[in-house]
Amino acid sequence: MGTTADTKLSMKLLIDAKAGKVLFAEAEKDCVDFLFHILSLPVATVISLLKEKGMIGCLHNLYESVENLDDTYIQSNLGKDMLLKPKSPVGISSGPLLLLKDVPFQTSLYKCDSSCSSYATDDPTAICPSCGRHMSRGLQYVAPPAKAAVAATGGFVKGVVTYMVMDDLVVKPMSTISSITLLNKFNVKDVGVLHEEFVTFGMEEALKLLKSSFESKTAVLTSVFMSRGKEEK
């Protein structure tokens, strides 16, 4: 499935109504792929996605400094996009990986027009260190078999099981024993206060989840989905 602005992911939440928190979520492969793919996002991409969401800290000041810096001060063989729009190092584009819609994977390589074939670059404005010419002659990228196999399968994890996503984003394969163990861990005495809720989420919720993951160590799912329920009432 391709990635679009309308792509939706889904999870089944187990909620402790008395405590007002999400204990954990049941998630399928596509949702776990999305969560794990967050790790491959360059820092600048994360900042650009969250700067309108009130990002905590001062990294966004660095981003805006580059944005506002006049091109006069930028090295002639470079450009702002090198920092502001870095390429994702992971070339998996299948599946509903919502945050990657603006993060292209760089597979273009270039060399100079002379016989200096020992040098290659991913920037067509680069200068060959041997002959001094622009390295603008395109080369065709060929992925190794292992990467091709991953791309064909799509995503990171296998879809053979359902996964458990904790409120602090710990992810592990789902099992009956682990569910019972968690109920004991959370000291749930009355299972009557627990209820399941099926939720779908798109780009907006994905950004809230990303933002919350930087702000909370324990209650990411709760902050995103319990607050959404209050807003809808």
Image: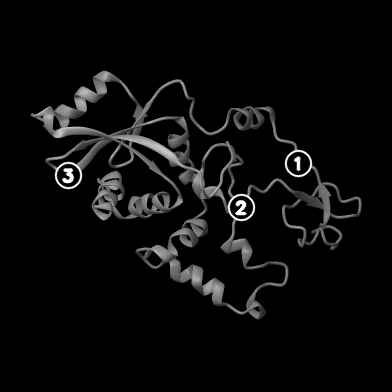
| Depth check, front residue: 11 or 45 | 11
User: Is the Cβ of the residue at disc 1 closer than 8 Å to that at disc 3?
Assistant: no
Q: Residue at x 58, y 49 (%)?
A: 88
In the rendered image, residue 80, in percent from the top left (x then y), is placed at 62, 68
Amino acid type, callout 1: Tyr
Q: Is 178 situated left or right of 41 in this image?
A: left
Foreground tag (1 vs 3): 3
Foreground tag (3 vs 2): 3
Q: Is 221 situated left or right of 153 in this image?
A: left
In the rendered image, residue 213, in percent from the top left (x then y), is placed at 35, 50
What colouring style does the render use? one colour
- Give the residue at mark 3: 20
Q: Residue at x 43, y 36 (%)?
A: 31
Q: Is 157 situated left or right of 83 in this image?
A: left
- Give the residue at mark 1: 141
In the rendered image, residue 56, in percent from the top left (x then y), is placed at 35, 64
In the rendered image, residue 214, in percent from the top left (x then y), is placed at 35, 54
- Secondary element under disc 1, as helix, strand or loop, is loop
Q: Which numbered disc covers residue 87?
A: 2
Q: Earlier in the sequence, mark 2 or mark 1?
A: 2
In this picture, is 59 found above or below 15? Answer: below
